[in-house]
Amino acid sequence: MRTMSLGPLRTILCLGAHADDIEIGCGGTLLKLLAQHRGVALHWIVFSGAGVRAEEAAASAAQFLRDAETRHVKIHSFRDSFFPAAWPEIKEVVAQLGSTVAPDLIFTHRREDFHQDHRTLAELTWCAFRNHQILEYEIPKYEGDLGSPNLYVTLDEDVGRRKVDTLFDSFKSQHEKPWFCRETFYALMHLRGLECNAPGKLAEAFHCRKMVM
């Protein structure tokens, strides 16, 4: 297993289908990158958030992006679980991002994700960004669709704790759901940390389909 480092990061684009997806999928990685790279402009786009969920998403983004130089947070209100039916409208939003944002790094959903909203957004990301570094994050869920990632970001204990604490402080509307628990989020980070022999025992993992060196 080889360790590689990223070059200078100026702009990061994060795409999430639902209000808490970005935080669950790559929250720890973002905290680590923003601590290591100063002057980053971060674009944080949530596609399904309305009412309380939108308020929670905005509060969470503010916490995760405290170390970003500039923050661009946009929360759309596309209907949860109906993204394939809104394909043209969502494609227009992603295409507009493709023509206005030039990210050095993109975080989005995995194309093999069983959730139709996640899968739709992943496919449209690849349509709009053909010359960019894209990392696909993973979301634990009932469908049991976790794959075999090929890129790992090791996390210190304090970063993992900050990720999970911020999730729980921000998304109180999700506390009643059995899958939304600290044990779930720590379990996945511990598993990925084991797979990459992380010094701090925690990691987030991604699917990297293309990398230009």
Image: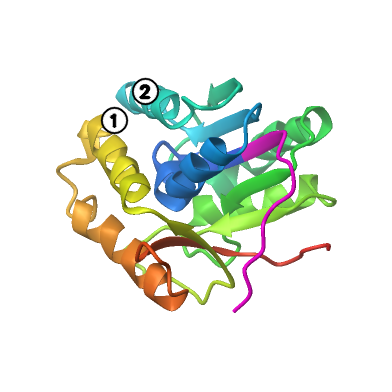
Residue 44 placement, left or right of 98: left
Q: Residues within 10 Å of mark 2 (few under 14, many from 20)?
A: some
Residue drawn at x 65%, y 38% is 13
The residue indicated by pointer 2 is: 59
The residue indicated by pointer 1 is: 170
How far is the residue under mark 2 from the one under mark 1? 6 Å
Q: Residues within 10 Å of mark 1 (few under 14, many from 20)?
A: many
66 to 107, vertically: above or below: above
| Residue 58 place in picture, x, y as percent | 42, 23
| Residue 80 place in picture, x, y as percent | 43, 41
Q: Going from the N terminus, do you reach mark 2 or mark 1 first?
A: 2
Residue drawn at x 54%, y 45% is 83
Region in magenta: 1-13
Residue 66 placement, left or right of 106: left
Q: Say what amino acid the circle numbered 1 marks.
A: Ser
Res 82 seen here? no
Q: Secondary structure at mark 1?
A: helix
**Camera-side residue of 9 and 104:** 9
Q: Are marks 2 and 1 in contact (CB under 8 Å)?
A: yes
